[in-house]
Amino acid sequence: MILNDLIAIKEKEIAGRKKIILRCCLAAGCMSSDSKGVKEQLDKAVADAGLQNEVEVRGVGCMKLCCEGPLVAVEPENALYVKVTADNAPLIIGALKGSKAAIPQADPNSAFFAKQLSIVLANSGIVDPERIESYIAMDGYQALHEVLHEMTPKDVVETMVKCGLRGRGGAGFPTGLKWGTVAKSPGAKKYVVCNADEGDPGAFMDRSVLESDPHSVLEGMAIAAYAVGADQGFIYVRAEYPLAIARLQIAIKQAKTMSLLGSGIFESPFNFNVDLRIGAGAFVCGEETALMMSVEGKRGTPRPRPPFPAESGLFGCPTLLNNVETFANVPAIYRKGAEWFAGIGTEKSKGTKVFALAGKIKNTGLIEVPMGTPLRTIVEEMGGGAPDGGTIKAVQTGGPSGGCIPSQHLDTPVDYESLGKLGSIMGSGGMIVMDQTTNMVEIARFFMEFCMDESCGKCIPCRAGTVQMHHILDKIVNRKATARDLAKLEELCDMVRNTSLCGLGQTAPNPTMSTLRFFRNEYEALLQSDPHGAQANGTANKTELGTK
Amino acid sequence: MAAKTLTIDGKQISAEEGATVLQAATEAGIPIPTLCHLEGVYDMGACRLCIVEITGIPKLLPACTTKVAEGMEIKTNSERLRKYRRMILELLFAERNHVCAVCVSNGHCELQTLAYSQGMEHVRYDYTFPKWNLDTTHRLFGMDHNRCVLCNRCVRVCWHIEGAGTKNVSGRGAKSRIITDLNMPWGDADSCTECGKCVMSCPTGALFNKGSTVGEMERDRDKLEFIVNAREKKQWIAD
């Protein structure tokens, strides 16, 4: 494979395009509403109408407005049919010939779509994720060619530093710095690992990227491998994502067949192979050291850092570990340049962020917005606000490691620092909207229960601390707790956060701490007066428990 | 090997490059409480009792896995650390059924000793009273999960000193438990060599010699150190 071959594939693909393209969503969300049946019926209706030479029915990835699925988009007239059933297929084909189809449509110019800026999701809902030619037609793998033939690994790292991309897994570590560290770590063998163990409740960004555009992740990994000097990659996907796994397998096979993965990629001395590793259902395996243990075939428990994976990671070798969304950003950065990317977003948070919008909101689905977009724009304009005339009470970001941002802070711009200041985190991109009916103490209890169940059990503060914190939260919800219990809860939050071994334990108190910060009155309203004399209003009795 | 100089609790000390903070402190006579640490096997930084404050590092780090560095300033005994350690011990006592009065290790128990030394006078958290069973199927030894603190010492000893790989951990979180072979009764675990090193390594009364009663279980940890020294340093020195 040389550049001319790649361009030939692209041109052939574009030349072979039919006049009308019906894009039918075949990502997991719409598939659960029988979009596969819709596609089959569309194919049949096209054949029945004898339009095979004019109409292509393309199975594509996520088209973002998940709540209205199954979605079918029509090119070039730019219509988007929603809640399509298999029976609607003949109507949609009929509409191509001018008859009015009585199928509900979404407005592609509404705020939900208009305010989005797609980099990671640029191909999502456009390309057929099961055909590499479809990706190549969108200039796929051209960035890899350019990197291999026109840049040194050092240049590649420099571009990554310049563009300002930060890790999209949640913590926001500068990607360029990480690449540079791995590149500089001595070692003949190095690894690149993609973390696709997305586990936050309500988050489905990475799943959608893998189901919709797997080749962008593979290309991103290959560029990263060239930059750091690795020849082997692993994608660690959770077993709960069977469709993502299947599409990755197809994508890897196709890339290997075309020599875009394997030995001597693009006739260069660069070799790179990618293998899949399937998770076995433990949330903690999204933590990088636990993930590597799991890839090695060991029990998935974290280990203390340092040493960091960049120095000693998988099988003791220097390892670059990035999240799906981080890798998916990479090809576009090398295609369009670091300056282009650095021009998007805020001073310290560059580019865009994909969010999975869920909860008590009209438009649920996938959105990609520039960093710095105010939460209000996302929730009220794009999301359409709370359904059924409700009012938004809070927005939860960062899943079990994040916090709840109350409605008075909705004007906060979405970037790493601003969310951190409010006691929440950017997280991997789960965004759960809550309305006035939500009990914030129950939310805190829900996330604490999640962390308690998912604690690996290795370190004591997380293993035993989450049990006690959950117990106290349960007591508060059931109106059996006193002010003394609340004080104990806060003390435990502080201790577990500061003494736990890994990120799971260190952030497990976050939902509780952030709801205590903004909704303390809801906690206090549930407290009972202390039979031993403490007041229910939060002032603890001076005689400490147990000093008798 | 280069030496490093550092300050621990205001005391200037020197340590070998590659040594852990715990080793450096121990050599200088500065006590740091530990539970999952055991001489002779690698450290895993799990119990968090040996956490220390290091100037310039916002996070608390376990002394057992943190390597010394030139000019490090370490505090091992601040009020904050003492409070966290007491809380960790309280959590352990509330987690399983640690009843000293009927325990084979009463008087020789590291958990008990730690509670005394760290000033844990009472447990403020609700006891969870979990229902754990007892495995006495082995010919020589018994395992009482009620007294297990999941320090993983027995697992590490079994894999890395004896090399048998009988002991392991199953489940996660508070439901984690030490198992033998593929979660079968200890007596049926074919890989067990009956060496007894796990029993020697246990800090509490969870692993015991059959036939011992209250307070009778004393452990000879020097044996483990002796074996490791003999193997790695070729020093056959017994105390």
Image: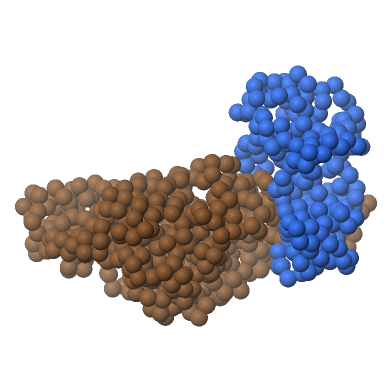
Chain colours: A brown, B blue
Q: Does the image show residue A305?
A: yes
A384 to A85, vertically: above or below: below
Q: Does the image show residue A527?
A: no
B227 to A472, vertically: above or below: above
Q: Return the residue nearer the eye: A240 or A388.
A: A240
Indicate the position of residue A113 as horizontal and vertical percent values.
33, 70
Query: Residue at the right extreme?
Result: A548
Would you say A176 lies left or right of A312 here?
left
Query: Residue at the top extreme?
Result: B139
At 65% across and 35% down in the image, what residue appears?
A: B168
At 73% across and 21% down in the image, what residue appears?
A: B138
Would you say B34 lies left or right of A371 here?
right
Q: Return the residue nearer the eye: A486 or A43.
A: A43
Would you say A509 lies left or right of A119 here?
right
Would you say B122 lies left or right of A253 here?
right
Q: Where, quadrant-wise, is the N terminus of chain A in this rendering?
A: bottom left
At 93% across and 51% down in the image, what residue appears?
A: A548
B208 to A339, vertically: above or below: above
At 70% across and 48% down in the image, what residue appears?
A: B44
A371 to A429, vertically: above or below: below
Indicate the position of residue B205 as horizontal and vertical percent values.
82, 34
- In which image quadrant can residue B107 be found? top right
Indicate the position of residue A330 as horizontal and vertical percent values.
40, 66
